[in-house]
Amino acid sequence: MLVLGIESSCDETAAAVVEDGRRILSDVVATQIPFHAKYQGVVPEIASRKHTEWIWGVVEKALSDAGVKAAELDGIAVTARPGLVGSLLVGLSFAKGMAYSLGKPYIGVNHILAHLYAPQLEAPVDYPFIGLLVSGGHSIISRVADFDEIEVLGTTIDDAAGEAFDKVSKYYGFGYPGGAVIDRLAASGDDHAFHFPKPSLHKGEHRYDVSYSGLKTAAIHQLDQYRKPGAEATPENIAASFQRAAVDILLDRLYRAIEDTGLRTVVAGGGVAANSYLRRELGARAEEKGLTVRFPPLSLCGDNGAMVAGLGCRFLERGDRSGFDLNASARVPLFRRIGR
Ligand code: KG4
Ligand code: ZN
């Protein structure tokens, strides 16, 4: 089954052709980062305008890279939620137009499920596993039971992990997007120069939740309070200490979820899954405890069309279809369990 996947939920205009939900025939991602950089954050109006300008070219390239004609497609999958609504609407409307004119089935999918499907492309992982989805918009620890079924164990109660990196970086003028810049600076810093506080959300339903507002405030406004005697407030030291604290917050909850569920496989995804401290620490822990950890390649960690095509294929092959009345939605209800 040949499926075209279209992704436009945030600031990447992306399309890919995937065969049988696994084999990536093409994967085109046009990033808008340079257009948002001067605002140090994604500007929704600019994002939807760029999607409108680029979507046709990106889809055309995905088809031509794959050597596939639109008429040969078996279906079209598109991210319909959650995300920036103006951005989502561009991809969704384009997918509907294509599906209608070609007389092909189409399906609107959930972006979070698509991220958690990403590791299934190329090298399948058995369900169930623990999913760690950490990006600029999400911090989700979940039990992934199947392609269409996840149980959200924990999420952030305020900022997403990547958002915290971006905000700290913005405050100090390190660069945009902040995650990669902080990661790079941290490489030559002392990650014990500052001992930032961790949130204490350990009760009841917050057992696996994370929070970044305390760390963000500490890293921005209370540096001196957490400084190790003699340590200097260099960008490298701030970056390294912040990065260690930010990732440790996630790992703490992730390890708890692994222990409680007894699951032995962890799959990470989202832009923050590129973080070198996270990869190193989780990798070492996995070795020590005999866990299997999968970090999809970086091209599949960030937003891409291949994960949408792959997931869409699973729905389409079992006969699921979306109607032309499907709307984009910015949010999914604050869920503990989500389906398509
Ligand atoms: O998944 P993604 O490309 O887009 C969405 O947010 O959906 O993730 C982008 C986020 C940004 O917040 C960025 O700062 C963060 O991922 N990020 C990183 C790293 N690379 C990107 N955070 C920490 N360490 C990195 N190496
Ligand atoms: Zn994403």
Image: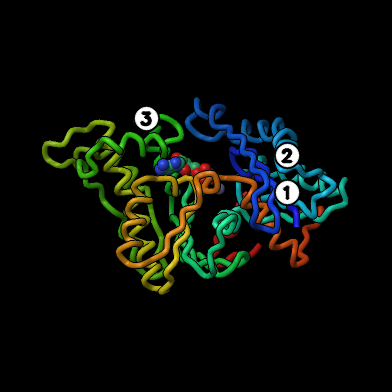
In front: label 3 or label 1: 1
Q: Are marks 2 and 1 in contact (CB under 8 Å)?
A: yes
| Residue for point 32% across, 60% down | 285
Q: How far across and how far down the image is residue 166, in percent? A: 42, 38
Per the model, the C-alpha gap separating discs 2 and 1 is 8 Å
- Label 1 sits on a secondary structure element that is strand
Relative horizontal placement of residue 104, taking residue 278 as reference (left or right)? right
Q: Judge by depth and name the residue closer to the eye, 153 or 312.
A: 312
Q: Pointer 1: residues within 10 angstroms few (<14), some, or many (20+)?
A: many
Q: Which residue is mark 3?
A: 174
Most extreme residue toward the top is: 38
| Residue for point 78% across, 60% down | 321
Q: How far across and how far down the image is residue 252, in percent? A: 33, 60
Per the model, the C-alpha gap separating discs 3 and 2 is 34 Å
Q: Which residue is mark 1?
A: 4
Q: How many marks?
A: 3
Q: Pointer 2: residues within 10 angstroms few (<14), some, or many (20+)?
A: many
Residue 112 shows in the view = no
Quarter holding the C terminus? bottom right
Q: Which residue is mark 2?
A: 59
Relative horizontal placement of residue 290, taking residue 332 as reference (left or right)? left
| Residue for point 69% across, 62% down | 314
Q: Amino acid at mark 1?
A: Leu
Q: Amino acid at mark 2?
A: Val
- Label 2 sits on a secondary structure element that is helix
